[in-house]
Amino acid sequence: MTGFDLHTHTTFSDGTTSPEDNVADAVALGLEGLGVTDHDTTGGFERARSAADGTDLELVLGTEFSAEHNGWSVHVLGYWIDPGHPPLADELHRLRDERTERARRIVERFNQLDVPITFERVAQLAGDAPIGRPHLAQAVVEVGAAADVREVFDRYLAEGRPAYVEKHAVPPDRAIELLTAAGGVTVLAHPGLFGPLQEGMDAMQVEHMAAAGLAGIEADHPDHTDAQRHGYRDLAVGLGLEITGGSDYHGDAKTNQLGCSTTPRAVVERLRSWVRA
Ligand code: AMP
Ligand code: ZN
Ligand code: FE
Ligand code: FE
């Protein structure tokens, strides 16, 4: 397997595998590079770095940053960021608190729907990670209200379903500004998963982000249809942006396999020194 898997999660957010696991599995698959992109945290950087030390695997450390547009989630991948940059670190801190408050509101929704989960158990499942919907889903499966995480999302937690609560997050252009100011290069994650029925982001919305400094579009994502992959590839080409791919691997929390979508080395090299043409 060649190329870079530029989008993976670990136990530092809502994945079920450690940074060491992701690095070892990427090496075993023969990947050239690995992105470690936990939601709204840079907490896994050191562990990933130590694990990759002495291997041929090239790490691309980043975060999958939560933004929102019209109340719907927009995820912006920020690579090569300085984790200590104050405005970014402050917003990441705020997002973590926001996720905790949102989890309390989601637990209340479930309780109103007669699903007896507790905030304490959800917090325990998240451990030190910012709380995400997969942690809530896991708690719901534990009390027997659904067979698996997928069913919890389909019935309750997907955007537009009864236990969905939005995060208060910055708009995408502000997210790009924060990540870029911290030395990062930004890529729009899975634009096809935006909106209530996953109708995807339209060209105007992406164009607005491009004007704010976006460098690439993650057109190759396992949850995109072939039509979406082609559509977002064409959009990237039209806007002079890079086309990337990543698996959005979450261990057992999702069915996505590590390395199922990748980015060629040449694209990673262009991203690393990205300057708008
Ligand atoms: P959050 O950041 O708390 O809104 O949670 C987002 C995460 O939930 C995503 O990264 C996915 O891991 C997971 N997720 C979102 N939608 C679904 C879905 N329909 N099925 C399974 N997992 C999902
Ligand atoms: Zn996730
Ligand atoms: Fe995402
Ligand atoms: Fe992700």
Image (cartoon, rainbow, N blue to C red):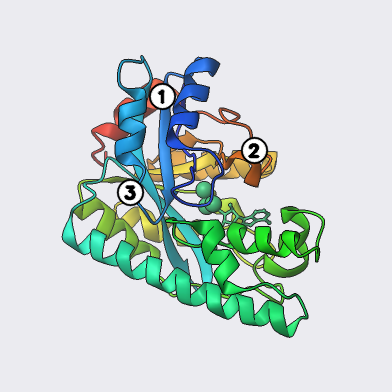
Of the 4 image quadrants, the one containing the C terminus is top left
Task: Residue at 48%, 56% (x, y): give it.
Answer: 127
Looking at the rendered image, the disc whose residue lies closer to the viewer, 1 or 3, is 3
Q: Is residue 200 above or below residue 157?
A: above
Question: Between disc 2 and disc 3, whose residue precedes?
Answer: 3
* Residue topped by disc 1: 33
- Secondary structure under tag 1 reads strand
Question: Between disc 1 and disc 2, whose residue precedes?
Answer: 1
Q: How many neighbours does mark 3 have within 10 angstroms: few (below 14), some (14-19), or many (20 or more)? A: many
Task: Residue at 43%, 61% (x, y): give it.
Answer: 66
x, y percent for residue 139: 67, 62
* Residue topped by disc 2: 256
Of the 4 image quadrants, the one containing the N terminus is top right
x, y percent for residue 81: 25, 45
x, y percent for residue 170: 37, 70
Residue 170 visible? The answer is no
Most foreground residue, 141 or 238:
141
Task: Residue at 25%, 59% (x, y): give it.
Answer: 88
